[in-house]
Amino acid sequence: MTFVVPQTTELMMSAVVDHMKARGVKTVGYIGFSDTWGDLVYNALQSLAPAGGYKIVTNERYGRQDTSVTGQVLKVMAANPDAVVVGGSGSPGATPHIALAERGYKGPIYHNHGTVNRAFIDAGKRAWKAQWRPRVR
């Protein structure tokens, strides 16, 4: 008999929360899947909020098959969060990041352990390069 016991979402998201806390993040916008995975990431983010010292200011959702998240991203940006957390996975997990970068969002965008794969990287690499391009002053 074999049991596979992966780390909990709270444990994995605690590293994200530690990083946000170290950067002084006080408000967080959330955009995630409108399914159980989106709920798990949001619930972990919410349960870690008291220790992380931040307030979640949006809870926007999108479907895995959605090709646009413009409406949700505009709501997130209107809340003016210090950082955004995306609760997606695979290549559809890159959709909000791409939309935020296209609209000029400058704050940090955090993801979760569900996005550690080649499809996610391939889907979002052009937006990430544009967002993190060194800026000439």
Image: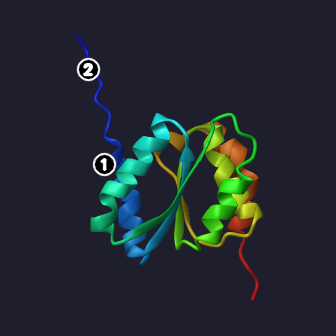
Q: Position of residue 44 (x, y in %)?
A: 36, 50
Q: Nearer the viewer, residue 15 or 40?
A: 40
Residue at position x 59%, y 37% in the image:
90
Q: Nearer the viewer, residue 77 or 13?
A: 77
Task: For marks 1 and 2, give the CA distance.
Answer: 19 Å
Residue at position x 75%, y 89% in the image:
137
Q: Position of residue 99 (x, y in %)?
A: 72, 56
Q: Nearer the viewer, residue 18 or 118?
A: 18
Instruction: Tally the numbered discs.
Output: 2
Instruction: Find disc 2 in the rendering and name its residue.
Output: 3
Q: Is residue 60 left or right of residue 126?
A: left
Q: Earlier in the sequence, mark 1 or mark 2?
A: 2
Q: Is residue 6 left or right of residue 107?
A: left
Instruction: Find disc 1 in the rendering and name its residue.
Output: 11
Name the disc covering residue 19, or none.
none
Q: Is residue 10 left or right of residue 96?
A: left
Q: Is residue 26 above or below residue 74?
A: below
Residue at position x 65%, y 37% in the image:
119
Residue 5, quarter of the rendered image: top left
Image quarter (top left, top right, bottom left or bottom right) of the N terminus: top left
Three-letter amino acid code of the residue under disc 2:
Phe
Q: Is residue 7 above or below residue 136?
A: above
Residue 89, quarter of the rendered image: top right
Q: Nearer the viewer, residue 35 or 136?
A: 35
Q: Position of residue 42 (x, y in %)?
A: 43, 50
Q: Secondary structure at mark 1?
A: helix
What is the crowding at mark 2: few (fewer than 14 residues within 10 Å), some, or many (at least 20)? few
Q: Secondary structure at mark 2?
A: loop
